[in-house]
Every structure is written in structure tokens, then in C-alpha cells.
Image (cartoon, rainbow, N blue to C red):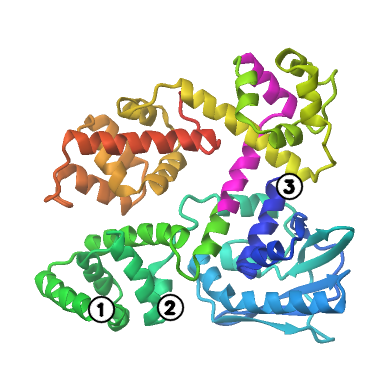
């Protein structure tokens, strides 16, 4: 399963949030085809209707190879997951979705000139169920409004890959949450943020100033003590809040929300964890396909890290990564292991799905890159060196999203002006304004950043940057 196949997996999680958990519970082994212009239309059993402001987008689903009972179970699972479709799509796209529902298909449905199609094969034992999904081209305009949907796009995978690789793709819009969640759901999320010290009364003041139409919902989501504390803060800052304050406040809350939705225990966390893992897999596969497998082995061997990399992997990873093992093809096994050990690794090997083999090879490559990192004597003193070696603007945005604006700005304290300017010039507003504010002392002036705190922040940044290198997401010089 390479990057184009991951895209269909992501789209499935967007239109049917949590459906993968259902497949796992039934012990299915799912595999996904790539998304391509449809050669022929599927005979739909069900239709997912996504209602926007001025149009309804129909996604057609057919299920073949399933018994009547299994077909009904899959339908019920799709129907249940569709209850969260509108919310998840809005959070990812930031655009208005009025609702989503799944219905049984009727004959005589309006036919589009062209559609996009992919399949999900659910395998278990000797049986196979095929789910075919036909996507209305207008569906992609929810995600990418500028996309021309009048003609088939045979490079749709490239377009979607760029969209899902945007650094802030999983950072939710606070506007969407305020508009779509009820006070109870909002209260649960705010309570988690409060417990983690990720949401202050001042930030709530900025949200109320930024979204006055939702001020009552924000207040009602707080406890009585929280409401009293907020009233004091509102009085304190009445007439003193600027547009930049509001922009920075909204950004800081959304950044924290992104972490809460991925790491928390609220209703949507599992969906965001799955999406986060899938988006990361795009980079994993891009790393693997940078060169052929033989060339990766040649590089690892050239660094004298082949044996150490093998030792870092369990037998299952080695067995799958070298599924095409022969004595002639991989002679280095004779150098590193006894014949008995080689036989132990490969004797019980059974044919694997291609995706399992590719995943094992990705894991092997990342173990090798982790060894490269371990040879790099990392510490807070290497923060400036690593930051200086980064050139791509997108890489700075990626680092920002992983570290958070406060840790990154703390790490930049006591750095030279040239380095500070390099970072802020490559980071978009309003995050750049927040970082400049911390460095200058105009934001959080009551927090003293001593050498211990600065070094702790630098260590964290170095850890994250090196982790991004291991995953092949950025390429600093190490």
C-alpha cells in the first residue's frame, strides 16, 4: 500500500468516521485501491448524501460478496458512522456542511458525467467482500475549492497528497467547534484543556471578542466558578483587546485543540488519532519510495549500520521486509547470522500482503535513520545548528506544528537575532507574532525564561526535529 492507496483510506475515514474500527472488530483485513476516474459506474446499494448550503453531494456505495446478514451489518455500521461525517468534514475543511445521511439507493438517480472510484476489499479466511465507492467530483471541492471538477483529473492523487500534507491540516477551526458542538460537548473539551493548562481565562476573553455571536455558548460551557472568573477577566480587558490579540488568541487555542482532539478522550479523539496516523503514513511511503529497496540496503550497508539495524528489528519485521529472501539475493545474512538463526527467521514465513511487506521495509528504514540520529550527539547546544540547517519554509511550519509556538519561542530565547529572524520570517502570521512577542517579552511578560527553561525547550525542539528526520518528513543536516 503506497501513498495513493493511503489517500483512499483517509477519504474513507472522512466520509465514514470510525469505520476502520468496525472492520478491525470483525477481524477483516482491509485493502484499498487508489482513487481514479471511474471506468464504469457501480450499481449502488446505498448513497451517502452530504448536504452543503446550495447543493447535495451524493457518494454511491455498492457491497458485493457479502451475505445478507453481513451486508446489513456493514450498512448499519456505515449508517452509524455517517452521524459524524458532517462534523469531521467541517473540521478538516473549515467549510459549512449542513448534514450527512446514508439512504438506500433508488433507481433513476441522476447520473454525473464522470465520477471518481475506489474499492475496499475486506478479506477474512477464504472470503472477500468488495465495497465500491463512487465519489461525486464535487466532493473534492469541499476540501479543495479551487479544484476544477468539470473534467476528470488523472493526477488527483498528487493533488490530494499536497492537501493532506499541509502542516495544519488536523488543526481544528474553533469557529466550527463553537458553531457545531452543543454546550455540553464544548464544556467537555474546554474542561480537558483547563486541566492541561491549555486554556486560560484571557484566551476565553479573546474567543468571545473574536466570536461575539457565540459568547453565550462559551460562557454556558463553563462551571459557575469558571463563569465568575471569566466575568472578572472580561471587565479587566474591556476595550483593551486588539485585532492582533484576537488573531493570536484564536491561533493558540486552535493549536491546543489539535493536541486535545488527538490525545484526549472526547468523542472525536479516536477519529483524529486515526487521521493523524494516516496522514503520517503518506510521508512514510514517500520516504520508502525515494529509492529502490536494493538502494536502501546499499546505503545502510555503506554506513556500516546494516547489522545494527537488523538487531533493532524483531523477527517479524525482518521476515516481512526480506520476504523475497534467498541466499544469493541477501548474502549479508550469512555474514551476520548462523545458518540455524537464518532458518529460524525464515522457515515459518507465509506469503504476506504487499502492504505488510512495505510497512516492514519502512520500519526497517526508520530503524536505520534512528541509528543515524543516535550517532548525532544531540542536546540543547545543537538546537541552533539544526535550525540553521533547515531551508524550506514548509519545514519550519512542520516544526512549529509539532513543537507548539510557546516551546519554539522559548527555545529561541537567548539565540542570536539572525536565527530568530530566520525562524519568524519562515513562519506564517499569527504564529510569527506570538513567537516575536515571547522573545521580546510583550507576551507572557510575567513568565521568566531562565537558562534551565530555555535549555529544556531546546532539548524538546531537538528531539522533535530529529524525530521528523527519522520519519523522513524533514531533512536537517545531521
- The reply to whether the C-beta atoms of the residues labelled 2 and 3 are less than 8 Å apart is no
Q: Which element carries disc 1, helix, strand or loop?
A: loop
Q: Position of residue 285 (x, y in %)?
A: 65, 41
Which dot, 2 or 1, sits closer to the camera? 1
Q: Is residue 101 above or below residue 229?
A: below
What residue does disc 1 label? 223
- The mark found on residue 1 in the picture is 3
Q: Give the Cα distance between marks 1 and 3.
A: 48 Å
Q: Is residue 421 visible?
A: no
Q: Give the Cα distance between marks 2 and 3.
A: 36 Å
Q: Nearer the viewer, residue 337 or 396?
A: 337
What residue does disc 2 label? 181
Asked whether 286 falls inside the magenta stretch, the response is: yes
> Along the polypeptide, which appears first: circle 2 or circle 3?
3
Q: Position of residue 133 (x, y in %)?
A: 76, 68
- Identify which residue is drawn at 38% across, 69% down: 189
Q: Nearer the viewer, residue 227 or 234?
A: 227
Q: Give the Cα distance between marks 2 and 1.
A: 17 Å
- Identify which residue is drawn at 75% across, 74% down: 74
Q: Residues within 10 Å of mark 3 (few under 14, many from 20)?
A: some
Picture quadrant of residue 255: bottom left
Q: Position of residue 220 (x, y in %)?
A: 29, 82
> Along the polypeptide, which appears first: circle 1 or circle 3?
3
Q: Which residues are magenta?
A: 277-302
Q: Residues within 10 Å of mark 2 (few under 14, many from 20)?
A: few
Q: Is residue 202 left or right of residue 15?
A: left
Q: Is residue 205 above or below residue 322?
A: below
Which dot, 1 or 3, sits closer to the camera? 1
Amino acid at each position: 500500500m503506497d501513498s495513493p492507496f493511503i489517500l483512499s483510506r483517509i477519504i474513507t475515514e472522512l466520509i465514514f468516521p470510525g469505520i476502520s474500527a468496525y472492520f478491525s472488530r470483525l477481524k477483516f483485513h482491509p485493502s484499498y485501491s487508489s482513487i481514479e476516474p471511474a471506468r464504469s459506474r457501480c450499481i449502488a446499494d446505498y448513497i451517502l448524501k452530504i448536504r452543503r448550503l446550495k447543493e447535495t453531494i451524493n457518494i454511491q456505495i455498492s457491497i458485493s460478496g457479502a451475505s445478507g446478514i453481513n451486508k446489513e451489518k456493514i450498512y448499519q455500521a456505515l449508517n452509524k458512522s455517517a452521524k459524524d461525517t458532517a462534523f469531521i468534514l467541517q473540521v478538516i475543511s473549515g467549510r459549512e456542511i449542513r448534514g450527512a445521511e446514508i439512504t438506500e439507493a433508488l433507481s433513476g438517480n441522476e447520473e454525473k458525467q464522470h465520477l471518481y472510484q475506489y474499492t475496499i476489499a475486506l478479506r477474512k479466511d477464504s472470503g472477500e467482500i468488495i465495497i465500491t465507492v463512487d465519489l461525486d467530483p464535487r466532493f473534492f471541492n469541499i476540501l479543495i475549492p479551487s479544484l476544477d471538477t468539470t473534467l476528470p483529473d488523472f493526477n488527483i492523487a498528487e493533488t490530494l497528497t499536497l492537501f493532506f500534507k499541509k502542516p495544519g491540516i488536523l488543526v481544528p477551526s474553533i469557529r466550527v467547534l463553537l458553531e457545531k458542538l452543543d454546550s455540553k460537548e464544548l464544556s467537555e473539551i474546554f474542561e480537558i484543556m483547563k486541566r492541561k493548562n491549555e486554556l486560560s481565562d484571557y484566551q476565553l476573553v479573546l474567543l468571545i471578542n473574536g466570536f461575539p455571536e457565540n459568547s453565550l455558548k462559551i460562557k454556558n460551557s463553563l462551571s459557575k466558578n469558571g463563569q465568575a472568573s471569566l466575568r472578572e477577566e472580561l471587565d479587566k480587558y474591556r476595550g483593551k483587546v486588539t485585532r492582533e490579540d484576537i488573531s493570536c488568541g484564536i491561533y493558540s487555542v486552535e493549536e491546543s485543540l489539535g493536541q486535545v482532539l488527538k490525545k484526549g478522550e472526547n468523542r472525536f479523539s479516536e477519529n483524529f488519532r486515526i487521521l493523524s496516523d494516516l496522514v503520517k503514513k503518506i510521508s512514510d511511503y514517500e520516504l520508502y519510495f525515494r529509492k529502490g529497496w536494493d538502494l536502501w540496503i546499499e546505503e545502510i550497508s555503506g554506513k556500516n549500520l546494516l547489522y545494527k539495524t537488523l538487531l533493532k528489528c524483531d523477527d517479524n519485521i525482518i521476515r516481512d521486509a526480506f520476504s523475497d529472501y534467498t541466499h544469493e539475493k541477501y548474502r549479508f545474512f550469512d555474514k551476520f547470522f548462523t545458518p540455524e538463526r537464518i532458518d529460524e527467521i525464515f522457515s515459518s514465513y507465509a506469503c504476506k500482503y504487499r502492504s505488510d511487506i512495505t510497512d516492514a521495509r519502512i520500519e526497517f528504514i526508520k530503524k536505520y535513520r534512528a541509528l543515524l540520529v543516535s550517532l548525532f550527539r544531540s542536546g540543547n547546544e545543537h538546537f541552533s545548528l539544526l535550525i540553521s540547517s533547515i531551508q524550506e519554509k514548509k519545514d519550519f511550519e512542520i516544526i512549529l506544528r509539532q513543537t507548539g509556538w510557546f516551546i519554539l519561542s522559548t527555545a529561541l530565547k537567548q539565540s542570536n537575532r539572525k536565527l530568530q529572524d530566520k525562524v519568524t520570517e519562515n513562519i506564517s502570521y499569527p504564529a510569527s507574532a506570538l513567537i516575536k512577542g515571547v522573545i521580546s517579552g510583550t507576551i507572557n511578560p510575567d513568565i521568566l525564561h531562565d537558562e534551565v527553561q530555555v535549555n529544556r525547550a531546546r532539548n524538546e525542539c531537538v528531539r522533535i526535529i530529529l524525530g521528523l528526520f527519522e520519519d523522513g518528513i524533514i531533512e536537517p543536516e545531521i
